[in-house]
Amino acid sequence: MKSQETEIETHPITSLFPSLDGDELRALADDIRDRGLLHPIVLDTQGRLLDGRGRLKACEIADAEPAFVTYDGGDPSGYAMSVNLRRRNITKGQAAMISAKARSAPEHRPRSGAEQSTRSVAEQTGLSLGRISQANMVLQHAPDLVDSVISGAMGLDEAYESARANKAKANSAEVQLARLRAEDPELADRVVEGDLTLAGAWAERTERVEEDKRQRKVATRLLDELVPSLAQTRGTTTFSRYDPAYATGTPITREVIAYAMTALTEMDQVWQERDLP
């Protein structure tokens, strides 16, 4: 018998549900051989499979002719979700995860454009508020685990704990990045652009702060040694007694004095800007 499953497109919502495993398919095929196909395969008006993917495959294995009916209601996505949740041998965790993923798909979003509340989804699917909330957390903060939960390879509880940890890390990273941007925008931009990790940026920030402290200490000691001593010479005869013959360093010239006066003017401006006494 020619494979019809490959010829029929599966509705996006139906495709979210895990396929029957080999033993389940063989058991279903044996049942179809013995009793025939008890429930026809349901298609939507576009010919896409809404319900019966396993039955269609089992008919192929049993070499039985499948029967089809068309769903002509106004909500094929909702029908596909409802009927597959009701008939599938899946856990509550899998069902919640499928429901969460389905609601993020364009074809299953509310036609009004409004987001469905967790409570309304729980009422529609028969799942608990807690399970729906857990699934939403996984979808948002551990999307790489969604398919593992749906397939049954990982439980929803385990995926939820990973999602919670990811959310905590993300929140912490956002706070750290905001603080970094306030203290050093250039480093924050490099993190956003992918040139630096957040940890690497903070390590560099720490180095910059320590270097800034070192330079401040050096500058402070230098000015503490020079400026007060110069100020003490005001009104004395020290200047008139200067003799280049006794200079132990670079001789003082009018050019050096001009530079010193410029330096003091610049220093006074900085002190005014910083409102220092």
Image: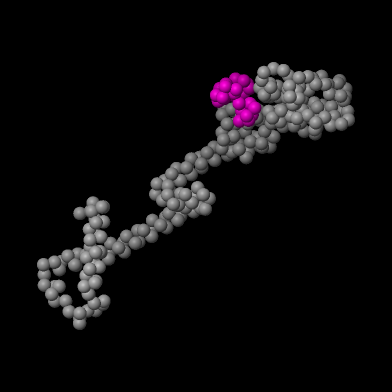
Q: How many marks?
A: 0
Residue 247: x and y in percent read 22, 79
| Residue 87 seen in the current view | no
Q: Is residue 125 magenta?
A: yes
Residue 154: x and y in percent read 66, 37
Residue 215: x and y in percent read 34, 62
* Residue nearest the observer in this picture, 150 or 178: 178
Left or right: 172 as drawn, with respect to 124: left
Please state the extent of the stretch shown in magenta in the rendering: 102-129
* Residue nearest the observer in this picture, 65 or 122: 65
Q: Is residue 182 magenta?
A: no
Residue 183: x and y in percent read 39, 49
Left or right: 44 as drawn, with respect to 180: right
Q: Would you identify the image quadrant in which residue 253 lies?
A: bottom left
Residue at 87% over, 25% down: 64
* Residue nearest the observer in this picture, 265 or 86: 265
Residue found at the far bottom of this picture: 245
Q: Quadrant of the C terminus?
A: bottom left
- Where is 235 relative to 200, above or below? below
